[in-house]
Each structure stands twice: as structure tokens, then as C-alpha cells.
Image (spheres, helix red, strand yellow):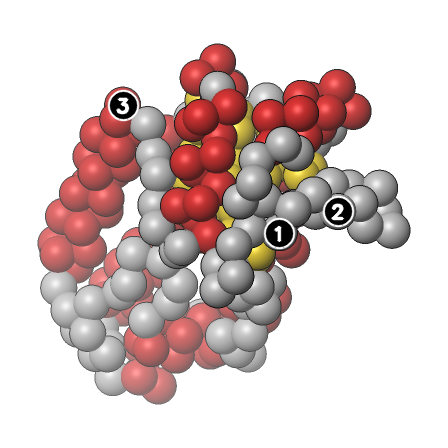
Amino acid sequence: MTVRASDPLSRAGVMSHLQHQPSIEMVDDTCGRAEPTTRPGDRAVTVMLAERLDEPVPADLRRVVRGGEQRVVLVTRELRESDLLTVVECGVRAILWRHQATEQRLLRAVHSAARDEGELPSDLISRLLTQVGRLHRSESDLGTGSGGPAPLLGMAPREVDVLRLVAEGLDTRQISAKLAYSERTVKNVLHALTTRLQLSNRAHAVAYALREGYI
């Protein structure tokens, strides 16, 4: 488990909580970060401390979990409504409020993440369920269309098909003709995609799809 923090005092605080735990072996890597190893059979875990989820934190989270080898425990002071699905998309397995991050809770979160189990504050679970329900209702209103309903995270086949044509420079009318969708369906697919993934516009959606390997 790698400990990442924006300041050395925060990092030292987490290390002091974990270094004497018999279930975690602390090792300094070449970059000077603490890298505790959990029990045999558990996956590697990164504890990341961040005041809030502003850039470059989401990008750092995605880099950490790339390849599926790391599980993330995020310790933070606040999460905005728009951040909730971002942390899920980034692969965060456990979240602790900074003011509640006692030694016992931190250790429990680390082991939960290592076992691929989740750990969220109770107030955050309620907010996340509310947002998931809102997105689910939004997707249901659009209908399933070609390729079935869009997943909560990632892209459905019909979204990939539409974005591939956007990337080729086709407009809504041309995409509609190419895929045998109505123009309204094309617009709804793009609107649902950009809303769900917090993307600014079509160009941002294409850039995201290219970066994530969808097109």
C-alpha cells in the first residue's frame, strides 16, 4: 500500500498509524513513499490524502488504479455532489472523512480495500444512492435503444458508435442517418453521456473516449 499526500506531515501521520500494525509491513520505495504490504493474498492498497477532489487528484487516482493492481483508500475533508461518481470511476474502494480517520478506522479501511470490499461513511452512502437513482431515472427516460441501457460508468456500445462518428466529423443529422437513429435519439445519447461522466461537450466526450480506449 502506497501512502500519498500533498504534505509530508499528513503522510507521516498515516505512517505512524500503520507502521506498528502486525498485518502491514512498511517498506520505503525509491520515491520515498511508504509502501506497506498487507497480508498474503490481499491486493496492494494506496492510501491517498486530499483536502478535496480538485485537479490533479482525479488524474492521480486514475494513474494509481491503472492496471487493476492497486486499491485506493481516500482520506478527504469534503466531497461535492459531482465528485461522488468520480471517485467510484477512479477505483476508490474506501473513503474516510479526515476528522474521522482514527487508527482503527484507517486500518479497517485498508484491509477492506485489500479484500476488494467497500467502506463508506454512512452519510456518503445516502448521497451516493440518491445520485445513482437520479441517473438511473434519467437513463430510463431515454429508453434502451440500440445496445441496451448505458452503464453507470464507462460507455455503452451505442454511445461508442455515436462518438466514433462524432470523432469522424459527422453532425447530428449524418449520425442519425448512418446509425438509423432519430436525431432526437442521437442528441439524447450524447446528453446522457456527457451528463453521466461530467464531460463538458462533444469534443470533451471524444477526448475521454480516446483516452480510455473506447475509440
Q: CA distance from mark 3 to mark 1?
A: 30 Å
Residue 96, x across and y down, in percent: 44, 28
Circles 2, 1 touching at the beta carbon (< 8 Å): yes
Vertical placement of 80 versus 196: above or below?
above
Which residue was labeled with disc 3? 123
48 w.r.t. 188: above or below:
above
Q: Residue at x 29, y 56 (%)?
A: 152
Residue 144 image label: none
Quadrant in the picture for residue 34: top right
Amino acid at dot 1: Thr
Q: Answer left or right for 143 relative to 71.
A: left
Please tell me which of labels 2 and 1 falls first in the chain. 2
Mark 1 packing: few (<14 Cα in 10 Å), some, or many (20+)? some
Query: Whole-percent x and y of residue 44?
Result: 57, 56
Total number of numbered discs in the rendering: 3
Q: CA distance from mark 2 to mark 1?
A: 8 Å
- Marker disc for residue 27: 2
At label 2, which amino acid type do we have? Val
